[in-house]
């Protein structure tokens, strides 16, 4: 059975970088192939993984909702959509990526999203792990894109605003009654420690950070050069921190 890891947090907290490094960790541990799902409308997980996107799910759904959609003879609407969705999978040696992208059309997305959920659920048995990079609002989780999440990693940058956003995300999870088995809070881009004021703010919302990922000049340089974060060296400070985090997640010793 596949193990699903999802990420959430306000914009600019390093969700996508963290997702890329989690995928790197899974690959290096031989837990592959990994199914990566970029559920952020501002999709950039592909760059972090060094994978090329041919078409996003948003583009497929927009085309599906057009009034004059032409379905080949002998195909139902559901079968045609599933065929189109299969074309959105960007494959590489160790990780396959599905990018949600931004919707480009109008109309009801309820039926396409139910097909998308079925599509991902059918794909999951082929992958030991799925990693989903979400936007802050958890829109795709609230739509039921997947049956459940085994571990939700909530990222906060080293700021009071980031800590307060963690509280809003936890409130949303409780309000929507999402099926999330474990949750962890990670503080990103830290100066090597977490300021006491941020720890106090996190405590107010019932969150104790699992760990901090320090600012890493190697991550910045790889981004500037357009290199895949999968290729970061083992001595990268961010890589080292994420490896320790993954030790705890995979051994079920992490969670709120």
Image (tube, rainbow, N blue to C red):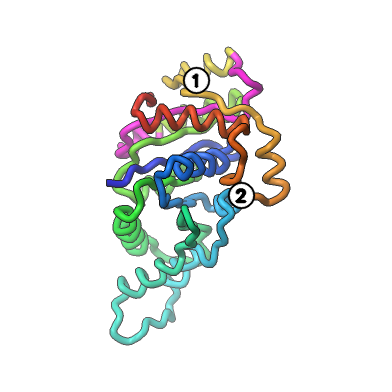
Identify whether 226 is placed above or below 66: above
- Residue at mark 1: 202
Tell which of 19 and 101 is nearer to you.
19
- State which region is magenta: 172-195
Q: Are there few (<14), some (14-19), or many (20+) residues within 10 Å of tag 1? A: many
Residue 190 inside the magenta-drawn segment: yes
Residue 145: within the magenta? no
Q: Quadrant of residue 179?
A: top left
Give the image location of residue 209, x and y in percent: 48, 22
Q: Secondary structure at mark 1?
A: helix
Q: Is residue 48 above or below residue 213?
A: below
Q: Earlier in the sequence, mark 2 or mark 1?
A: 1
Is 175 located above or below residue 200 in the figure?
A: below
The one of 129 and 212 positioned closer to us in this rendering: 129
Looking at the image, is 140 positioned above or below residue 172?
A: below
The residue under the point 49% across, 20% down is 202
Q: Residue at x 37, y 33 (%)?
A: 250
Between 101 and 88, the residue placed more toward the observer is 88
Kindly tell me whether residue 162 is visible in this rendering. Answer: no
Query: Residue 47: x, y in percent?
Result: 60, 52
Mark 2, residue position:
228
Q: Position of residue 52 (x, y in %)?
A: 57, 61
């Amino acid at each position: 059975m596949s193990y699903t890891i999802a990420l959430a947090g306000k914009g600019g907290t390093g969700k996508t970088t963290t997702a890329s490094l989690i995928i790197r960790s899974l690959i290096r541990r031989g837990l592959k192939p990994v199914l990566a799902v970029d559920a952020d409308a501002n999709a950039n997980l592909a760059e972090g993984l060094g994978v090329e996107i041919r078409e996003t799910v948003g583009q497929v759904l927009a085309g599906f909702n057009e009034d004059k959609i032409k379905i080949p003879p002998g195909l139902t609407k559901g079968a045609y959509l599933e065929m189109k969705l299969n074309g959105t999978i960007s494959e590489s040696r160790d990780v396959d990526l599905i990018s949600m992208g931004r919707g480009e059309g109008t109309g009801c997305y309820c039926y396409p999203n139910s097909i998308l959920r079925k599509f991902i659920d059918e794909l999951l048995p082929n992958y030991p792990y799925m990693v989903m990079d979400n936007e802050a609002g958890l829109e795709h989780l609230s739509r039921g894109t997947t049956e459940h999440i085994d571990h939700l990693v909530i990222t906060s940058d080293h700021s009071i605003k980031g800590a307060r956003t963690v509280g809003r995300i936890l409130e949303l999870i409780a309000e929507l009654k999402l099926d999330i088995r474990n949750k962890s809070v990670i503080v990103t881009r830290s100066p090597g420690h977490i300021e006491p004021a941020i720890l106090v703010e996190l405590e107010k919302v019932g969150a104790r950070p699992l760990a901090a990922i320090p600012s890493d000049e190697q991550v910045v340089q790889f981004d500037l050069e357009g290199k895949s974060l999968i290729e970061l060296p083992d001595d990268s400070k961010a890589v080292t921190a994420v490896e320790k985090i993954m030790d705890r997640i995979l051994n079920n010793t992490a969670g709120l």
